[in-house]
């Protein structure tokens, strides 16, 4: 199966980190992966966007109207990048607002989840978990393996919080859809 995923946020939110985790997990499943990223103003809180294609593609960039999934780590990024979604595509948006609307939109209040779990540095992993619950691009277990590898030099507590964030986001979205 081919997937085209746009991940959007602002500098410091971990857009590139989430993209790398997802890309590596897919490669570990022997899937072809292409990525591209734009992060010009990231150091000043500007928009960061990455394109991730899984499957038989020739170019890493996703054309407007072709993405299967948009993961907006910040609510403001949804209106900015929703044009990438294909008809029937899904948007997972980090928002507490009931005012953000779209037939394709599934709200996830990852900020509230992170605050509740005292896990503020893992908001992006709550969103990654939600994305995995929405689109079957790779297994939750593959992402968990990547988190364990990436956080191998960190404490058990940090690793456990990262895994908790991933699972919480996944379980939340599985109930929603």
Image (spheres, grey):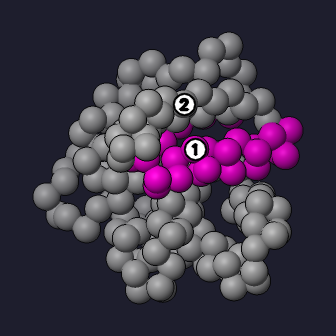
Q: Is residue 121 visible?
A: yes
Q: How many marks?
A: 2
Taking the image as shown, residue 78 lies to the left or right of residue 149, namely left
* Residue 14: image location, x then y, percent: 53, 53
Image quadrant occupied by the N terminus: top right
Q: Residue furthest front?
A: 44
Image quadrant occupied by the C terminus: bottom left
* Residue 135: image location, x then y, percent: 56, 49
Marks 2/1 in contact by CB < 8 Å: the verdict is yes
The vertical placement of 104 against 32, above or below, is: below
Q: Which residues are magenta?
A: 1-30
Residue sitting at 68 percent across and 13 percent down? 58
Give yes or no for residue 168 being in the magenta stretch. Answer: no
Relative depth, front residue between 140 and 60? 60
Mark 2 and mark 1: Cα distance apart in space: 8 Å
* Residue 31: image location, x then y, percent: 79, 35
Residue sitting at 63 percent across and 72 percent down? 162
Q: Secondary structure at mark 2?
A: strand
Relative depth, front residue between 32 and 80? 80
Question: Residue at label 2?
Answer: 37
Neighbourhood count class around disc 2 (C-alpha, 10 Å): few under 14, some 14–19, many 20 upward: some
Q: Secondary structure at mark 1?
A: helix
* Residue 16: image location, x then y, percent: 58, 44
The vertical placement of 120 against 41, above or below, is: below
The vertical placement of 98 against 163, above or below, is: above
């Amino acid at each position: 199966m081919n997937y085209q995923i746009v991940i959007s946020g602002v500098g410091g939110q971990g857009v590139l980190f989430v993209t790398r985790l997802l890309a590596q997990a897919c490669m570990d499943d022997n899937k072809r992966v292409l990525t591209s990223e734009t992060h010009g103003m990231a150091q000043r809180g500007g928009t960061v966007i990455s394109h991730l294609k899984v499957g038989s593609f020739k170019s890493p960039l996703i054309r407007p109207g072709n993405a299967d999934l948009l993961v907006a780590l910040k609510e403001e990024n949804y209106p900015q990048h929703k044009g990438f979604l294909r008809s029937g595509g899904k948007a997972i948006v980090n928002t507490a607002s009931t005012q953000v609307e779209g037939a394709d939109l599934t709200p996830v209040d990852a900020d509230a989840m992170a605050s509740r779990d005292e896990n503020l540095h893992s908001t992006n992993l709550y969103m990654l978990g939600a994305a995995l619950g929405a689109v079957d691009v790779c297994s939750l277990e593959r992402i968990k393996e990547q988190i364990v590898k990436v956080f191998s030099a960190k404490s058990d507590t940090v690793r456990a919080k990262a895994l908790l964030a991933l699972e919480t986001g996944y379980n939340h979205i599985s109930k929603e859809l």
